[in-house]
Every structure is written in C-alpha cells, then in structure tokens.
Amino acid sequence: MSWSLPEAVSAERLRPYDLRCEHLATPLGIGTPAPRLAWRLASDRRGDAPSGHRITVRGPGDALAWDSGWIDGQAPHADYGGAPLASLTRYTWQVELRDGESARSWFDTGILHPGEWRAAWITHDPETEPPFEPPKDDREPRSVRTASLPAPRYFRRVVELRPATAVRIVCTARGLYELRVNGHRVGDGELTPGWTDYRKRVPYQVYDVTDLAGDGPLCVGAVLADGWWSGSLGWDGRQQAQRYGRRPELLLQLVAEHADGSRTVVGTDGTWRETTGPLRYADLLMGEWYDARLELDGWDLPAFDDSSWAPAGIADTATDVLVPSAGEPVRVTQELAPVEMRVRDGHSIADLGQNIAGRVRLTVRGAKAGTRITLRHGEALTDDGDLYTANLRSAEATDHYVAAGRPEETFEPRFTVHGFRYVEVSGHGDFDVVGRVMHSDTPVAGDFSSSDAMVNQLMSNLRWSQRDNFVSVPTDCPQRDERLGWTADAQVFLPTACYNADVAAFFTGWLADLRCGQDAVGGAVPDVVPHVMTERHGAPAWGDAATIVPWHLYRVYGDERILRDSLPSMRRWVDHIERHNPGLVWRDRVGSHYGDWLQAGVTTSRDVMATAYFALSADLTARAARVLGDPSAGRYAALRERIGEVFAREFIAADGKITGDTQTAYLLALAHGLVPGDLVPAAVSHLVADLERRGRRLTTGFAGVALLGPVLSEHGHADLAYALLHDDRYPSWGYSIKRGATTIWERWDGWTEEAGFGPVAMNSFNHYTLGSVGAWLYGGVAGLGQAEGSAGFRHPVIRPLPGGMLRWASAAYETPLGRLASRWEVDGGTLRLDVRVPPGAVATVHVPTTDPSSVRESGNPVPVVSQVGSGRYAFTAAWDR
C-alpha cells in the first residue's frame, strides 16, 4: 500500500472514529493502569460540537469494568477510571456521544504487575554447541568485517496444553527475534522488539495466538539474532559489536486461559532447546547470509525431533527492565517493483525508482544447489553505471543466498535493513526482485499537494525520508554505518513529522530513552538517543531536544502527560546550562558543539546559536511548568527574560546587525523573540539583504533551515520564502530534485557538477533534517496551524499564503479532534479558499485578498478574518497579485 492519508470520514451527525488507546489503535500489551482512550470526530453539519460523552469498558464475559457516566465537555479523550485492570486481558470499550453516534474498539493489557513474570532470559551456551561444519562445496567466504559474526539461534519448546479459551504470548529479546507457533509466523512486526536503551528499558510485545493453538501440543519457536544488542552499531573506527551484550537473549511467557477460569503459564527456562540453522549470520549493517541447504524443515512443529539440539542456557532472571511497547512496530508497508534492470559484466542492477529503507525479496529459478546469489545495495550509481557504495563507509549492506536446488526459491532477509534505491544481483541470472519498504508504521496524518511538480516532489522526498529514517527510533540515515538517533535532527524535523504522521506514540517511547540517557547528576542530554556514544553529550540544539520535543508534542496532541513525564528532565537540562554559564552566554559545557551543522559556505557564531537555544529551552520549560501549574514556571520565565537581555547586549548591534551576520543567526533571534522590538525591522532588513546579496540563495544548515519560510513570511517577505522554495540552483532543495533525488539529501552538496559526489565520510542521500521545510508547506503555504495558546488544535488558525509560482495548494491534517483542511486556488482575479474544521474546534480563518470588501463565504459578505465552528466553508475574494 502507499503511504497516503485515508479519505475523510463523512457523517450526517456527530460520529466518533479512529478510536485509540494510548495513541494506538487496538493495541496488544497496554501497560499503564489508567490508559488514555481517545477518538476523533466527524460531522458534515456546520457548528457541530459534542456536549458530552460516555465511556463504558467491559472485560471478560462482558463484565462492566468502568462506566464513566456522562462527562460534559468537548474533549475527545478520557483516562480510564474503573476497576483495576487485569494483566493479559482483552477489554472492549465504547464511546457514546450525547449528541451523536457511538463507536467501539478494544485493547489488551500487558503484564501489569512485576510479580507475574515467570520467565528467564535464555541464550546460547557456547559450551554445549557441537562444532559446525559447513557444506564441503561452500566454506562461507566472508569479509574481514563479517568473519566474526555469529549465526542466529533457533529456539523451541513443545507445550502440552489443556483446552484453552485464549492463548497469549509475551515475548521480547535482547537482540532481535521472530516468533513462530505451530509452523506459522506470529505477528507482522519486523526487527522486534526494536531499539531502546536496553540497560534501562527493554520493550515486550504481546501476541494473541489462540487461533494457532488448536488441539494437542503447541510448539513455540523463535529465531534470535544480534540486532542492536550485540551486532554492529556505530561508524567506522568506533563501530562496536556487542555494545550492550555478548550474545542475544530471549524471554518469552505463554499464558493460556481455560474455561474454568484457571491459567497455565509457561516461560523460557533451561528446558528449551536451541541450535543453528540456515541463517549463518545476520547483522543490521553488514547484511545476512542464508544457506537454504541447511533449512530445518518442520523445526517449528510439535513432531520435530530436536534431540540433537542443545539445551538453552539461562543468562539472567531479572525482569525489572521490561516495559510494554510504546509505539507501532516496524512493518513492511509497501512493495516496489524495479522500474529498470541493467545487465553488465556478469551482474544485474535493479533500479527501484525510489530510495528506500528496507530489503529485497529475491525469487530465483533453476539455481543449482550451492549456487550463491549476492545482493549488494546502494543509493546511487557511479558515472560508469556501477553501484556507488563509498558513502556506506564500513557498512557492507550485502546479503547472500545459497540455493537449495529447488526449481524456484524465494529469499528475504529477516534481521537486517538497508538504505538503497539500487540492488546489484550476481551469481545467477534467472531471478526477480521486489523492494520491500520497512519503517515504524506510524499512521499517516497529513497530506499536502500543489500545482507545482517540483514542490510536490519535495514533499514526496521529505515524506520518504521520514519513513526511511523512522525505524524504531528517529535515525539520521538508513544506509551507512551510523543510523543513530541524533537529537538535533529529530527536534528540527519534529514539526514536519507531526504533520505527516501521528508520531505521538513513536516519540513518547523515544523521549523515555532520552530521559534514561540524561546525566542523572548534571543534567546533560546525550547527542544521540538511545545513548550509545558516551563521550558526546550536551551540545547546543542537540541537548535542547529535551525541551523542544515534549513541548511540541504537547502542542500538537494536547496530552499533558507528556509534559508531566518530561518536566523534571526539562528543568535539569536548563539548570545544567545555567549552572555552567552564570553569565547567561552559553560558552561552557557545549559538548561537541556542531554549530549550524552543514551550513553552506558560512559560519554562524556558535555563541549566538547556543545562547538562542538556551533562551528557547528556558522559555519552553517555563511554559510547560505553567501548563502543569508547577511553581517553577516563574523562575524559568524570569531566566528567559534575563537571557534575552544578555543576548541583545552581547550579540545585537545598534543597527540591528547580529554577530556573524548569517541567515541562521537572524532566523534564530527573530524566531525566538530575542531581537528588541525597535530593532526587529533592522534585523529583518539584514536577513533580507544577505539573501539578496547571494542572489536569493540560502546558506542555512540544520539549525536554521526550518525557520526560513516562517520568519520571512511573518515579516512580510513571503516572496523570498517562495523564491527559495522554487530555486533549483545550488544550494537548494530543487537542486537535488533536478538531479533525480527521491529523498532529502544530508548535505546541500551531496552531489555537484563541479565535484561529483560529496565527502564519502558523511554523504547520505536519505536524511530528513534539511526537509524540515515541510512544516512551512503545511502551516504556511496551506495555512494549517493553531493559535498561540491552543493545544491539540482546539483553536485552529487557517491562514494560507498564496504566492510564488503556485496556482493552488491543498493540505489536510488529522488533528486530535478530527480532519482540518484547506485548499486555495487563484483563477484570474479571484481566490477561492475551501476550509474544513473538525467538530469541537473554533477556527480563525484569514482569507488572503487584495480587496477586503470582496470576501464572501457561500456568496455572503464576511470579514477578512472570521471565526467559524466545525463544518465546510467556501470563501472567495479578489486577488490581483
């Protein structure tokens, strides 16, 4: 399927839809005792707003667990307030609207009490393993980097069960696992359980396997691989296998419910058996080697003879780090057939036409037993048409398949992921390949389109880069030997990410890891989360993710619990900066201080940038405390004012020029209110002058790029913002698009006519940060935003910005209340603006026009600025620009 926004729900009266529990649809394994139940609303009637709702929750046997009674108000959510929830139990729930319809959904709980665990961590015991002798005709020639990679392990146990009414399995790993029951794969998640700070948090998954249990014995099996736990992680020179542990470990607990109300519980222990199989190695960065001649036919069925297998070793019995999964799993969400196949020099190169994160499904025909087919992956081709892999650094991104000799065989890796557009296939000529797109399956929330093909390609590119880099955590690149959760990259792109997808659950989990990685004593925040680079922490813009991310998530989703969980972390981060910089210019304890990373041809003052972020973090901490009624709000608000005064005194001259005189310096100061009011026009003039002096070209790096559109538009220079949007000269978004980019490049000079490919040490062609312009496309060009004091889009603001070469632009967004949308089009001297507002919201609509007296709504005169309730509206106005 494609990653697209579903059609808007149509309803003649108020209808709840998209019911969620803890930001997830029908989740298995909810771990909080009072989960949040939420829904969106649809109605085609103008002015519809719910006056109240009632929630009922029922457990087994339809027993009532909670009846909220009628709750007055319009909030489309409620926290569970009934009887204590039982572990591993399905609950159905219904929301009923006083003024409309009702809807139902369900959730399953996880293990809610620590004393309920009955499983141990099991692993391979090296002392029990017989020596492996590979087939004589293939000694597995490996590279230096893959020579020491271990073979994944196959675990199994047969369980004799009495007839059961429900069977659930709770499973996780230190490493990666694939679960199987009675010959069937269980679940559709990939790379489970995902990547967290394993030292403090290991998420588990819950599966309902009742339909697979049947009558008779039950065989439970799992394949276990290194993954992030003990596989390759990081970059060349610092790449460390076994960063968390020496070998992967499995923990599984089966719980069967019987008709008499009793439960049978079986956990992983020393009675499980394990061995190796056809997977000879599996590594996230290096790839996989699969030898089909070694397949263990029927190994996951009860009758299989496992007498030659070894007993599993018990690695650990601690369960205190186990937590329920917070977000959607990584899934295969789309397939791409090659758009071109090139055959040369004994190998073939398939072009998928799109840069992706994922893997290839290979089908071979007529390969003799022992034939080795090799798949190499890359993002680009060299000038002579070969696969370009220099930018992968030490990541081999290579999969090997050794054929069994069947007439037709299919291979798809299971425990690796590659970033690629092109795949080179060698070793056999009769084959098919299909690209399989993998990413955390965050629900699509927004859509933007326009009359301009290049702008639409830009939106496509940044959406693909979001998908490709949201793989369990928000990473910086999906292809090379890095793939780390850089905190600045995430916070800069977050506003765009929230428009594109519902990332509430995804970032809630990531924030938990950020808090785990924060220095417990000093308060410094790591540069990457999960925290695996202990020497890198506290950098300006990077550490500020501790304040920016929770505040923005609260603004978008209206969930105060995000602030409640994060406020202590926010305070410790700001206190850390203040403690080491009592003069309030942030110069000390700046960590690696990357500055305005990958700016083009200029150097923004690091003191200016750092102090601007210091002011922003103090401000957001004050705001968060104010929302929660925390008494520290006043202190942080006062701190923000003092930082502002120091910033103006230290960095802003009397003529409004800011130290360094770079675009990013002005953008940061103007965006965050650090320029005194009387100097704002002068500062804006300096910014504009710099752009004009450079022929209307940008120079911003990571810290400034997202602010170009909003700041220029706010200060009356939308023409410049549009000029940058449409530019296809270097450096610009259009420059990469003109050269065939299908994702956002990491650097403006990823490839140029003068130099060819950029520096191989850091040159990803799939990196979302410079695509943070997406938030302006939604919020500026299409005009979908919310009022300053609004959270959860209770008070939307629709203020589109016609301009540039666009004849029309359209955007839709699933707010927590429901669908918000706008579409404007200029035709001759008339502008038409179509608006949709969700039930319960009161929107302020600004109609662009050159003649305020010409504004009409459905033919009736209305003001240029109107407040409207829910429903659809059609405005027209004069437009002669």
Image: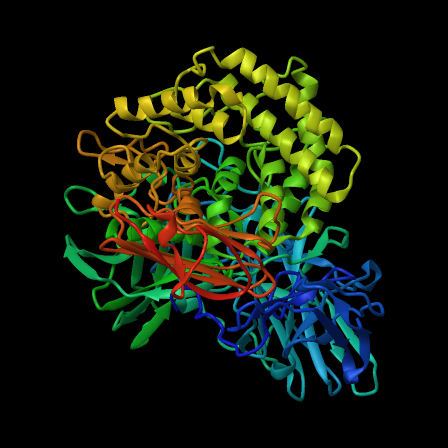
Front residue of 649/212: it is: 649
| Location of residue 826 with respect to 643 vertically, above or below | below
Q: Nearer the viewer, residue 367 or 482?
A: 482
Residue 242, placed above or below residue 188 = above
Residue placed most toward the observer, 243 or 683: 683
Query: Residue 641: x and y, percent?
Result: 65, 23
Q: Position of residue 14 (x, y in %)?
A: 59, 74
Left or right: residue 220 versus residue 391 is right
**Residue 538 seen in the figure:** no
Position of 48 relative to 228 (above/below): below
Of residues 280 and 472, the one nearer the viewer is 472
Give coordinates of residue 15: x percent, y percent: 59, 75
Q: How many marks can you see?
A: 0
Q: How is the image coloured?
A: rainbow
* Residue appearing at x 20%, y 42% in the figure: 382
Quadrant where the C terminus lies?
top left
Q: Quadrant of the N terminus?
A: bottom left
Q: Position of residue 322 (x, y in %)?
A: 72, 55
Say whether residue 10 is visible.
yes
In this rendering, position of residue 754 left or right of residue 799: left
Horizontally, is 356 left or right of 235 in the view?
A: left
Q: Residue at x 68, y 44 (%)?
A: 199
